[in-house]
Image (cartoon, helix red, strand yellow):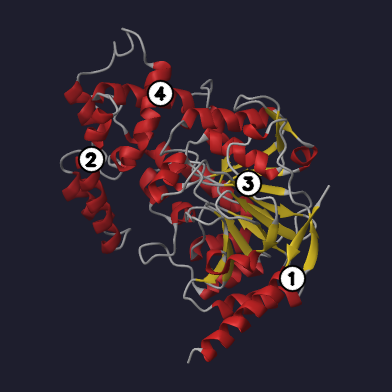
């Protein structure tokens, strides 16, 4: 069944999910019941990185008139930046129409007919912030066990967690590695909820710390060596610009001060922190670990039709690789690097793909690089990483259309940003040729349909021009 989407005086026959459940109380957040064209929200919904929205109009016009849009054969349900909030994830699954609640418990859900047909893409950043890292991953696993078609993309928080846990010294005689021994501390206070969760789930009882060294030794193994601040700039000088090195030094100094007090506030000793790290390794890296599947399934990008799904964005090196060898080569290089040399992974182009915001310290994407992405048949990047407060947004960045889909759904971020209530969001790419952005923080679902959105955007910018002339 579909609901007509009202846009001005016209009706657009675009399917809008029904948020199904026997009782409305099972739907934690309030979800939109109607939709408008994506341009309805003005600056909250579309723009261009340097402020010239006519460039976005020109790019949409080019793609639409040349009929360059290619749509996937099955629905794509995209969820990003879950940040350890299982409740928000399950609410987002319901918002997508891909699952139906079957009981009052958070894990009581099953696939709908749409869910059986769709591809569920987890767009990165499952870790950190809280409240429940492991519970969120169990919900993702539940979706997989229902035989859903699930793809998990790497986020910057996910990669940092892996590198941080691996960086901790395993014994007193282990050689100091100044290239990498700061990665655990780099996680900072955001990792504390995960450490608490591991302690409470696995490290209770009188013998839980029986084989764990004393506090000072645990602190030594967790923190970078005292020589790190002198050694790292010299090591990194041939690989990183001075500005980025300075940022890293400043960041680690700040976390040297904040990390242990944050642990103490949560009731964690350094022995418990160290024990939790060792348990994390067992859970995630051992073949029989409960969460061994997580990093094993992880990939850097997913390409279908005109759309590339990643966590953040591209630089020239990754655009070159994509153009030359395709997305399989991107994912193969990512898999090879993920358990390789941490320094090379995190400060190279692969990690830039999961953390870039196209700042001066990020790797550059030139017009030539953007053109190579276009030449690869990709005309829109769908990603998270840039947290928004009014649902999803279309932006033109480096000449590429970006659907920005981090709608700030986790409890921690919502409290920090002053957003009320529980969060939920999903971006749906339909084979019929349209995209829906659904979020608890925008009153309508945002509907992108190339021809209609192009007309609406042209009218909106024309109206803006007339208003500007009238006010002169």
Task: Give the label, 1 or 2, closer to the camera.
Answer: 1
Q: Secondary structure at mark 4?
A: helix
In the figure, 399 relative to 269: above or below? below
Left or right: 264 with respect to 3? left
Q: CA distance from mark 4 to mark 1?
A: 50 Å
**Dot label at residue 258:** 2
Question: Mark 1 = which residue?
Answer: 452
Task: Give the label, 3 or 2, closer to the camera.
Answer: 3
* Sequence-first disc among 2 and 4: 4
Q: Position of residue 202 (x, y in %)?
A: 41, 17
Query: Residue 395, can we see it?
Result: no
Question: Mark 3 = which residue?
Answer: 31
Measuring 67% from the left and 24% from the top, which residue is drawn there?
103
Q: Secondary structure at mark 1?
A: helix
Q: Position of residue 143 (x, y in %)?
A: 65, 32
Measuring 77% from the left and 61% from the top, which residue is drawn there?
433
Question: Mark 4 = which residue?
Answer: 198
* Sequence-first disc among 3 and 1: 3
Measuring 60% from the left and 35% from the top, which residue is drawn there?
90
* Sequence-first disc among 3 and 4: 3
* Sequence-first disc among 3 and 2: 3
Q: Secondary structure at mark 3?
A: loop
Task: Give the label, 4 or 1, closer to the camera.
Answer: 1
Q: How many residues crowd around disc 1 within 10 Å: few (fewer than 14), some, or many (20 or more)?
A: some
* Sequence-first disc among 1 and 2: 2
Q: CA distance from mark 2 to mark 4?
A: 21 Å
Q: Are marks 3 and 2 in contact (CB under 8 Å)?
A: no
Q: Are marks 1 and 2 in contact (CB under 8 Å)?
A: no
6 and 100: which one is in front? 6
């Amino acid at each position: 069944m579909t609901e007509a989407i009202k846009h001005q005086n016209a009706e657009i026959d675009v399917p809008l999910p029904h948020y199904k459940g026997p009782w409305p109380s099972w739907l934690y957040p309030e979800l939109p019941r109607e939709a408008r064209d994506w341009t309805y929200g003005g600056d909250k919904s579309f723009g261009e990185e340097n402020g010239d929205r006519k460039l976005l109009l020109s790019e949409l016009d080019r793609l639409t008139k040349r009929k360059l849009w290619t749509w996937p054969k099955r629905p794509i349900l995209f969820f990003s930046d879950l940040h350890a909030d299982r409740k928000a994830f399950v609410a987002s699954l319901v918002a997508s129409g891909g699952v139906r609640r079957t009981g009052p418990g958070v894990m009581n859900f099953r696939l709908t007919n749409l869910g059986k047909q769709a591809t569920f893409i987890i767009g990165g950043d499952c870790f950190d912030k809280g409240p429940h890292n492991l519970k969120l991953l169990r919900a993702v696993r539940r979706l997989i066990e229902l035989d859903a078609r699930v793809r998990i993309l790497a986020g910057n928080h996910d990669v940092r967690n892996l590198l941080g846990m691996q960086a901790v010294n395993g014994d007193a005689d282990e050689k100091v590695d100044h290239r990498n021994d700061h990665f655990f501390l780099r996680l900072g206070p955001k990792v504390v909820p995960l450490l608490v969760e591991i302690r409470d789930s696995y490290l209770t009882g009188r013998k839980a710390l029986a084989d764990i060294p004393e506090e000072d030794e645990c602190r030594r193994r967790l923190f970078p060596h005292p020589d790190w601040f002198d050694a790292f700039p010299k090591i990194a000088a041939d690989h990183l610009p001075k500005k980025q090195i300075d940022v890293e030094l400043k960041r680690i100094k700040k976390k040297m001060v904040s990390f242990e007090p944050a642990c103490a506030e949560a009731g964690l000793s350094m022995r418990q922190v160290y024990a939790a790290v060792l348990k994390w390794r067992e859970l995630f890296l051992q073949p029989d670990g409960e969460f061994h599947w997580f990093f094993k399934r992880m990939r850097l990008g997913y390409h279908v039709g005109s759309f590339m799904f990643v966590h953040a964005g591209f630089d020239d090196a990754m655009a070159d690789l994509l153009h030359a060898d395709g997305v399989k080569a991107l994912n193969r290089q990512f898999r090879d690097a993920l358990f390789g040399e941490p320094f090379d992974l995190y400060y190279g182009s692969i990690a830039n793909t999961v953390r870039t915001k196209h700042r001066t310290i990020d790797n550059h994407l030139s017009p030539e690089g953007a053109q190579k992405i276009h030449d690869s048949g990709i005309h829109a990047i769908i990603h998270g990483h840039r947290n928004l407060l009014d649902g999803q947004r279309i932006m033109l960045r480096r000449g590429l259309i970006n659907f920005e889909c981090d709608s700030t759904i986790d409890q921690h971020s919502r409290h920090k940003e002053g957003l009320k209530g529980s969060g939920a969001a999903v971006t749906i790419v339909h084979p019929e040729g349209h995209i829906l952005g659904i979020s608890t923080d925008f009153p309508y679902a945002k509907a992108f349909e190339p021809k209609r959105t192009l007309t609406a955007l042209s009218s909106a910018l024309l109206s803006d021009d007339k208003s500007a002339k009238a006010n002169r």
